[in-house]
Image: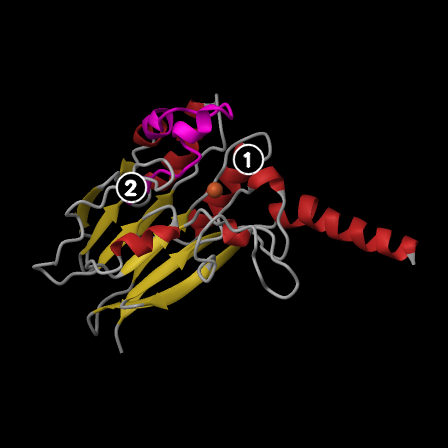
Amino acid sequence: MMCSLAAVAAVVYTDMRFVEPNWLGLGVHRVPLLPAGSERIRILQISDLHASDDVPLDFIEHAVELGLQQKPDVVCLTGDFITLRWDEWNAYSRILERLSKIAPTFGTTGNHDGGESLVSRGGYHRPTKVIEMLEKANVRVLMNASCNVALPHKNPFELVGFGDLWSNDFVPGELLSPRSEKIPRIVMSHNPDTKDDIERSDWDLMLSGHTHGGQLTLPWGSTPFAPVKDKRFVRGLHQWQNHWLHITKGIGSMRNMRLNCFPEISMVELVPMA
Ligand SMILES: [Fe+2]
């Protein structure tokens, strides 16, 4: 009996540590936000890259290459580019620049990119280095800012990016005031718990990460370690109130462990309403 338990534990550990974290997939979701007859808009979302000793740049480049193969119209990078510290900024920038060369690429930061709470753990006080790296890669950083995205032969939409909640950089201000022009309004916000602060505001779809999909999913489906208050929304596409939420499982993970929760890049397609 003891031998079989030890064998099961060894198999589970091998899967968690050496198989799942390296088995990158593609999640595809469709959100009906466009007028009938419109061309779909394909948004590639990549999040929680977590460059570190556990997640080398080779793996991040593998994710970027998988993303490039999808031929996205727009790319959204939703935070946690590093785990604590990083040195190879130029190499990182060159990898992300591959995305901005093929499509308009936008980004916002996560709680691991810089913040007061990281300093005692060896992280950065502010996400300055990450932002510099993104700008060098021609990624437009939206930190409590918005812009209209107009693609050739596609309907325009508005993209709003927020700073991170745990880093005290989440400042909605007037960015989600009622729209005068009814084009889709897409929000990038690393932590999906931010939805509660903007529940009554005017927006359509939030793109988040942060949870790593729960990272460790127990056999009965619960995700007790997901770092969010609202554990109903830790991965995938959901309708909530009169909004849509998409939470990607992300690329990297903490301590390089995943269980029943493979890493992913996500393709979120805006499609016509029925
Ligand atoms: Fe993360």
Q: Which residue is mark 1?
A: 58
Task: Name the residue: 30% across, 30% down.
Answer: 135
Give coordinates of residue 5: x percent, y percent: 85, 55
The x, y position of residue 273, in whole percent, is 25, 74
Is residue 62 left or right of 197 when viewed as pictured?
Answer: right
Q: Quadrant of the C terminus?
A: bottom left
Q: Earlier in the sequence, mark 1 or mark 2?
A: 1
Could you give the CA–CA distance between mark 1 and mark 2, rounded to whole angstroms? Answer: 31 Å
**Which residue lies at the image location 54% right of the left edge and 53% below the top edge?**
214
- Label 1 sits on a secondary structure element that is helix
168 or 60: which is nearer to us?
A: 168
**Residue nearer the viewer, 34 or 179:** 179
> Who's the residue at 49% across and 56% down the image?
26
Q: Is residue 118 left or right of residue 131?
A: right
Nearest to the observer: residue 270 or residue 120? 120
Q: Is residue 155 left or right of residue 28?
A: left
Which residue occupies the extreme bottom position in the image?
Answer: 274
Residue 230, relative to residue 118: is it above or below? below
Three-letter code for the amino acid on which mark 1 is drawn: Asp
Tag 2: amino acid? Phe
Tell whether circle 2 marks a residue whose Cβ is less than 8 angstroms from ligand 1: no
For the image shown, how many numbered marks are present on the structure? 2
Q: Position of residue 237 (x, y in %)?
A: 41, 63
- Is 10 in the magenta? no
Name the spot of residue 184 as percent of width and height, x first. Answer: 20, 60
Which residues fall within the magenta stretch?
104-132
Q: Secondary structure at mark 2?
A: loop
User: In what quadrant of the picture does the N terminus appear?
Assistant: bottom right
How many C-alpha atoms fall within 10 Å of the one at disc 2: few (<14), some, or many (≥20)? some
Task: From the image, tell me which residue sits under label 2.
Answer: 170
